[in-house]
């Protein structure tokens, strides 16, 4: 099947999934519906034939049945939103969101390469820095990295990035990015991502003492919330991150590499709701 970003009709994507499964094994519409947890054996065929719409609760069921995770899962939901839009204004808004997501996450799914990429903080730094320092040797690149990095470190990272296809070498000491984002499969890199976040957080702490306030922006708030508020805040953080990425993409005169850490974490254990613990009443 084609990558999901090449689709603008969720019904066609679902039908292609069905046809592919049918091509390699015995697979029926009844089985597809059952796999997604629907009682009606013909419901998904009716959806794909355009005779009915996929409901909001059905999005998760069908996405899981098709094995969609992460960005693919999100994108499928947007495809359904676009396809089910009731008027031109809703359809236009959904299309803009689809196209924005596709631009934001131009990714390749990798495993071992992604693990190494996310495990070593020098990889994303060099990947951003090397293209804006044409004809520079590893020592010159290393000298511009504020965390402790040697010329040998940079040389090895450059070799890895080129071999893995994350950078394209276009001349002596000259590189360009092949893709705007790198993503590893959900199964391959959770520990590597933890390592990356841990190391980048350390660099953030270091910057408090080494960088002037004109170069860095730190702020924070301590607050009491519940699960519903947490979910809303996470959604706002995600929207903010996407806006920041859009701004960075519009930058035409890149001259420095920055890291943005968005952190939201608990400082206490959960407290029982008032009145829940009868033993506390006097």
Image (cartoon, rainbow, N blue to C red):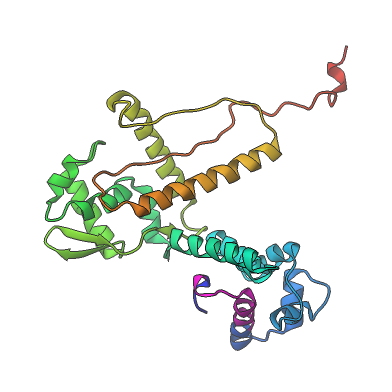
On screen, 35 above or below 196?
Answer: below
Magenta-span inclusion, residue 115: no
Q: Is residue 68 visible?
A: no
| Image point (55%, 59%), residue name | 70
Dividing the image into 4 quarters, which one contains the C terminus?
Answer: top right
Residue 122 is left or right of residue 107, and the answer is: left
Quadrant for residue 106, please give it. bottom left
Q: Is residue 244 visible?
A: yes
| Image point (59%, 42%), residue name | 234
**In the image shown, does 131 or 146 lie closer to the viewer?**
131
Residue 228 is left or right of residue 257, and the answer is: right
Count of residue discs:
0
Q: Which residues are magenta?
A: 5-18
| Image point (56%, 74%), residue name | 8
On screen, 92 above or below 236?
Answer: below
Quadrant for residue 206, please give it. top left
- Give the percent coordinates (x, y) of residue 224: 65, 27
On screen, 6 above or below 223?
Answer: below
Quadrant for residue 211, please give it. top left
| Image point (40%, 44%), residue name | 196
- Give the percent coordinates (x, y) of residue 248: 37, 50
- Give the percent coordinates (x, y) of residue 236: 57, 43
Q: Characterize the magenta stretch by its predominant secondary structure.
A: helix
- Give the percent coordinates (x, y) of residue 249: 36, 54
């Amino acid at each position: 099947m084609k990558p999901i970003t090449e689709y603008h009709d969720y019904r066609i994507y679902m039908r292609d999934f069905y046809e592919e499964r049918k091509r390699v094994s015995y697979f029926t519409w009844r089985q597809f519906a059952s796999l997604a947890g629907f009682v009606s054996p013909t419901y998904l065929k009716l959806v794909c034939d355009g005779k009915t719409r996929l409901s909001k609760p059905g999005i998760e069921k069908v996405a899981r049945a098709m094995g969609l995770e992460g960005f693919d899962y999100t994108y499928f939901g947007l495809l359904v939103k676009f396809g089910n839009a009731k008027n031109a204004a809703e359809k236009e808004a959904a299309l803009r969101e689809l196209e924005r997501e596709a631009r934001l996450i131009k990714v390749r799914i990798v495993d071992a390469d992604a693990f190494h990429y996310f495990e070593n903080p020098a990889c994303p730094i060099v990947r951003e820095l090397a293209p804006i320092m044409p004809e520079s040797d590893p020592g010159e690149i290393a000298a511009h990295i504020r965390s402790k990095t040697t010329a040998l470190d940079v040389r090895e990272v450059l070799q890895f990035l080129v071999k893995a296809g994350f950078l394209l070498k276009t001349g002596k000491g000259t590189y360009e990015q092949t893709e705007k984002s790198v993503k590893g499969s959900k199964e391959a890199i959770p520990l590597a991502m933890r390592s990356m976040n841990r190391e980048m957080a350390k660099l953030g702490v270091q910057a408090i003492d080494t960088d002037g306030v004109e170069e860095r922006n730190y702020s924070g708030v301590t607050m009491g919330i519940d699960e519903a508020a947490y979910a809303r805040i996470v959604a706002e953080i995600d929207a903010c991150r996407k806006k920041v990425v859009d701004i960075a993409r519009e930058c035409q005169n890149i001259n420095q590499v920055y890291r943005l850490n968005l952190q939201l974490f608990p400082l206490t254990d959960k407290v029982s709701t008032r009145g829940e613990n009868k033993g506390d009443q006097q």
